[in-house]
Image (cartoon, rainbow, N blue to C red):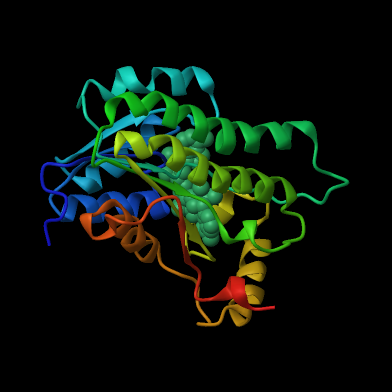
Amino acid sequence: MQRFKKKFALITGGTNGMGFATAQQFINEGGRVIITGRSAETVTKALAQLGENAFGIVSNAGKMNDVFLLTEKVRQYTCHIDVLFINAGYGKFAPIEFADEAHFDELFNMLVKGTFFTVQQILPLMSDGSSIILNTSIVTEIGMTNFSIYSAAKAAVQSFIKTFAAECTEKGIRVNGVSPGYIKTNGFNNTGLSPEQIDGAIQSIIPTIPFKRFGNPSEIANAVLFLASGEASYIHGTEITVDAGISIIR
Ligand SMILES: NC(=O)c1ccc[n+]([C@@H]2O[C@H](COP(=O)([O-])OP(=O)(O)OC[C@H]3O[C@@H](n4cnc5c(N)ncnc54)[C@H](OP(=O)(O)O)[C@@H]3O)[C@@H](O)[C@H]2O)c1
């Protein structure tokens, strides 16, 4: 399929995991992609794998100076964005007693301020027929211990799906979200857990997942591309949960 021929996507956090898988699939379907990441090293490495239809910008979603420079940097490659996938981020664990203000600010700056101001900055490059997709998480629907700040930040992102959709309707820009369950990415490396703790956590989580496996980044990319495509032309202001049903288990 070539659903995205002549289309340009901006994917924040496209050097790895779900963002990278989405970039790969978008390019495979005829599109061109700009990815962001926090370091020249990760961006360059990803671009080498993505090929000539990928472009990169070093930009930290948690640093407002970077976010406010994004439009100017995007304009070096294109004056029009058809698909904006706001994906950059990670979670960090901390029990209520030990979570400090720096932890709170880090996650809220990156996920909440980063999402809001990236959309604000890129919106002038988008027009009728374009689409915005926000990456949330199933943690907005469940009470996961030690994840209160990340979950609250993702709940704010989830709220933006509806408010942005309401405001973008007149512009003809559809806004939706994808809510991943447990996905096999490097995301756990940022949580503050040691490699042994990560492995232990993964082994204890697998039996709780209805399909008894973590999802693959490509399974999130499939949902993002669907939401971005013409096949989703009547879908606006909602979220697709991609979690093997874990969020409905009680
Ligand atoms: N994995 C899961 O189970 C899961 C579940 C639900 C939701 N999510 C969400 O899915 C999104 C993607 O995560 P992933 O699991 O695919 O993790 P990942 O493989 O670690 O990828 C994260 C991506 O975000 C980038 N990134 C991180 N912080 C950034 C920042 N401050 N500014 C710009 N880019 C940043 C990373 O790039 P650099 O390292 O190059 O900066 C990387 O490209 C995140 O929003 C995460 O919260 C993950």
Q: Quadrant of residue 120?
A: top left
- Rendered position, 16 above or below 33: below
Outermost residue toward the right?
97
Outermost residue toward the front?
170
Who's the residue at 40% across and 54% down the image? 18
Question: What is the x, y in percent for residue 206?
Answer: 59, 77
Q: Quadrant of residue 215?
A: bottom left
Who's the residue at 29% across and 51% down the image? 228
Question: What is the x, y in percent for residue 15?
Answer: 37, 44
Quarter occupied by the C terminus: bottom right
- Rendered position, 13 above or below 18: above
Who's the residue at 31% across and 63% down the image? 222
Instruction: Say whether residue 79 is left or right of residue 207.
Output: left
Quarter occupied by the N terminus: bottom left
Question: What is the x, y in percent for residue 157?
Answer: 56, 43
- Rendered position, 42 above or below 183: above
Nearer to me, 96 or 16: 96
Nearer to me, 5 or 129: 129
Instruction: Say whether residue 98 is left or right of residue 181.
Output: right
Q: Quadrant of residue 224?
A: bottom left
Give the mark count: 0
Who's the residue at 63% across and 73% down the image? 205
Question: What is the x, y in percent for residue 150?
Answer: 66, 47
